[in-house]
Image (tube, rainbow, N blue to C red):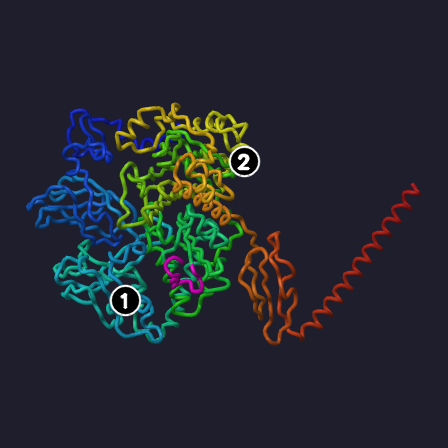
Amino acid sequence: MMGRLTAAIFVLLVSCVCKTSGVTGCEGYCGRALSSCSCQPTCASLKTCCADYKEYCVSTLPYSGTILGGTDFVVLDATFNASSEVVCRFDNSTDTVGYVDDTGRGHCISPTLYETGWVSLKISSDNGTTFNRVGSWLSVHTGKLDSKFKAILVNSTKWQYYGTPNVGGSLEMTWDISLVGADRVNIELWGYTETGEPYSDNWQGRWEYLYSLAKDQPNNGSFRFVPQPAANGFSSWELGSVRVSPSTYPDGTWNVQAAWTEDHALAWHLEEKFRLDSAGWALEKCLAWDQLEEKLPNFLDEIIDCPCTLAQARADTGRFHTDYGCDIEKGSVCTYHPGSVHCVRAIQASPKYAAGQQCCYDKTGVQVLTEDSIGGSTPDRAHDWGSPPFKKPPRIPGLSHWIYDVLSFYYCCLWSDNCNYYFKHRPSSDCRRYQSPSSAVVFGDPHFITFDGVSYSFNGKGEYTLVTSEETQLVIQGRTEPVEGTTLNATTLTSVVMTDLYSDVIEVRLASGHNSLEVLHNQRTLSFSEQSWMDFRGVFVFCPTSTNVTVMFGSGAGVEVRLREGTMTTTVLLPEEFKNSTLGLLGTMNGDAKDDLLSSSGQLVQDYSSPEEVFEFGASWAVLNKSALFTYDSDYLLNEYKFVPRHDDTFIPQFTVPENPDDPLANLTAEICSGEGSQFCRYDILVGRSPQMGNATRVSFQSHVTLMNDLKPVVTCGWVSPPTNGAKEGTTYLRGAVVKFSCDDGYILKGSAERTCQNSGQWSGEEATCVTPSKIPGIVAGSVIGAVTLIIIITTLVLHSRNRKGTVQDSNLII
């Protein structure tokens, strides 16, 4: 296991072992520990920072902005003067010009980037001669950006349908005037395109300034205009964004402070031909796209199948995440998927073609298919969220998806009625190949339920391996601390840290006061005050609230951490690929409960009912000092965990629940704890001395039971087509579903009028077809004649065979 952890430990420890003698400042040494002080993220809480730490290892406000650029941010705590010539370098490749304000604070302007996630930031105060201040910047997908950080298209549907029948008049946009620090602004249109041979080295994406809608306008936060068809050939640009920027800059100046709209279909500026016959214009574009798709490689075979039900889709958080364009928790405004109430996207792009998968569900919780509805689930040639290494098509976030999947939907489905062309290349994936992940959980004081369903309690104090996998080098470690406020020895999970193959290290732990969760990335504490989703190397983190964190790895592994009543519940979800490859406190994921409690030395627990034997098993999974992934940023953590054995063998827990009828908590325990899993709840109240913890344990157990039910495999028979010249009733294809068939006037049904999805995954009955009555006699006569002819042929063959046998027998007698 030590070899498997090398890459992860290197990420965390390389800076620790490189102590530099003689260096007393952080200039050029951010992230490293020096001989006399530290330039590491943990130095502030440990009070070991070099005096100039904040001067050179900088943070910014805000820390994030749109991928399109134009965000003005302050460099915190660094010193600049009036003569400083500020240049900011992003991702080691793109420079923007900054400035110093009247208070002496340095500012940077974020550039247009072709990637999302954290990128490196280097800052120069001598016009780019030296870049001695370093930090990072979070580039955000326009669809995931909070609306307060962008210009808003008022009635965006009108903007993108402008010029189609009955859609015209004026258009309006608004913005927060603080996003553009100028009294007067220009309103500019920028276009995006991709050029070169798809999937070749010369395939490139680029933004380009097109023209200004207005110049030298007052920065009053709104702009209204009546669009005209673009002149000078600009109407050939079909995708773009409107930018509001200071009028002091020449037209189309790159990387200045600005407010951008979301990228959108530029229906409102297309040529006059579109306005005269939008459906005909769009059909031409649809047919051209159809021809292009015929030449491009097939990506459908390498994308993940959709979950069968909405419950599965929302539970499989390691591989699927809510699509911001169709979210049941935000009112199910599903513009591109009418009839659906919720959609999810596969988190990871496909390995070769960087394709995506989108899965949509109706109000009954079943998947909507494109064969039945325009609002069905659709795969994507380019994943909407992009994929590493970004920067080039089809991996450019949002934009590549627009070019290859969204504009074509407008051509074929929204601006014309020719969806058959679109769905030919973007058919729904049904769920016949979908396999639910396995789940395991740690909760309460602490209690464990393994991947194969074994439940037990382990109250050791220390740091332990929850899961390790040889297959993907997934490592998940947990820290337990004594429960406060009890004279009996009990512990609870207070931190979980994890890494995967080639991924950064993510730690989620209880914050001070146990009222919220704290997330650390490679030992640096993260703030989710601006963004709830963050991209890192090999891992994504979603934190919509301070009590809810989900970590998603490239392998499909997912880790959910929830805070309930001051205690952490950690759920691990692993896809089928992890089968037979996991070890640790959460067991061996192979469907066999008998080998789940396997110690790190390979010894099986013989008696699951023996708390002492189970305790020895748990203690065996103590993390070795050199393989620990945790952050130690307080004297308490250093002294209690880092500088001592990772399992405290002096801490002996209370193994059994004391039975004392006079216990003042006895009646409350009986009231709170009942039914399946009540033993865990009882322990946490009577030993942990906390009814709140006991109730949280009860809720966590019930949540796990619900999760297991949501993830149960379902039987599906797959989509069944309606007969030609007929119709079908029913769009559910799971076990027990009934689909009925009927024929149009003038046709008669042949086959089964009703078919049921059976336990075997096969439809009952026979395929339904619709035929004309005049053909029935012919069909019957043909069938009779065919049958008679077949009988004559078989009879002739049999007689012929007998005659040959008789001849052979006669010849044998003669011999």
Where residue 154 sits, quadrant-wise, is: bottom left
Checking the image for residue 154, the label placed there is 1
Q: Which residue is drawn at 67% across and 75% down?
A: 774
Asked whether the beta carbons under mark 1 and mark 2 sit within 8 Å of each other, the answer is no
Q: In which quarter of the image is the N terminus?
A: top left
Q: Quadrant of the C terminus?
A: top right
Q: Relative to residue 300, is residue 784 depicted above or below?
A: below
Q: Upstream in the sequence, badge 1 or badge 2?
A: 1
Residue kind at label 1, given as amino acid type:
Val
Q: Is 440 on the left or on the right of 230, as rendered?
A: right
Query: Which residue position is annotated with label 2?
Result: 593
Checking the image for residue 429, the label placed there is none
Position of residue 118 measured from the top left corner of the image (x, y, whole percent): 28, 45
State the SS at label 2. Answer: helix
Q: What stretch is highlighted in magenta?
A: 328-341
Q: Name the magenta segment's main secondary structure.
A: loop
Tally the marks. 2
Q: Which of 785 and 599 is in front in this view?
A: 599
Magenta span includes 333: yes
Position of residue 489 measured from the top left corner of the image (x, y, whole percent): 39, 30
Magenta span includes 320: no
Residue kind at label 2, given as amino acid type:
Ala
Q: Relative to residue 166, is residue 581 depicted above or below?
A: above
Q: Which of 433 and 712 is in front in this view?
A: 712
